[in-house]
Image: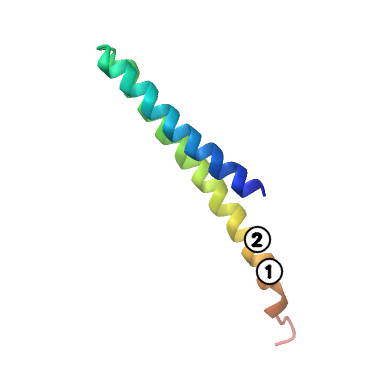
Amino acid sequence: MFTLLLLGILVAVIILAFYISTYLYENDITLVALLVVVVGIIVSIILVGWIMDNTVEFVSQKLEIFYNPDS
């Protein structure tokens, strides 16, 4: 469930960064628009890392039944 929440936040960050940077670029505030884009990319990378971590943890818990430590 937490992964779905993170996916929603990721989509919201991407859309928000796009619209804010487009508005700023159209009003000739390019430096701030570039800063918004860079911050959006960094936040998106962090969120994708959390999503991958949660997904890997979930899959490893489900596949734990196949682990045989006696072999």
**Left or right side of 27 for 50:** right
Query: Mark 1 = which residue?
Result: 62
Query: Neighbour class for label 2 at 10 Å: few (<14), some, many (≥20)?
Result: few
Identify the residue shown where x is 66% and y is 46%. 2
Residue kind at label 2, given as amino acid type: Phe
> In this view, which residue lies farthest toward the right?
70
Q: CA distance from mark 1 to mark 2?
A: 6 Å
Q: Assess whether mark 2 and mark 1 are in contact (beta carbons under 8 angstroms).
A: yes
Q: Residues within 10 Å of mark 1 (few under 14, many from 20)?
A: few
The quarter of the picture where the C terminus appears is bottom right
Is 70 above or below relative to 12? Answer: below
The vertical placement of 12 against 6, above or below, is above
Q: Is residue 46 left or right of residue 31?
A: right
Question: Between 53 and 10, which is closer to the camera in this rendering?
Answer: 10
Which residue is painted at 73% across and 81% down in the image?
Answer: 69
Q: Which residue is mark 2?
A: 58
- x then y, percent, for residue 23: 33, 18
Is 29 on the left or on the right of 54, as rendered? left
Residue 33 place in picture, x, y as percent: 33, 20
Q: Secondary structure at mark 1?
A: helix
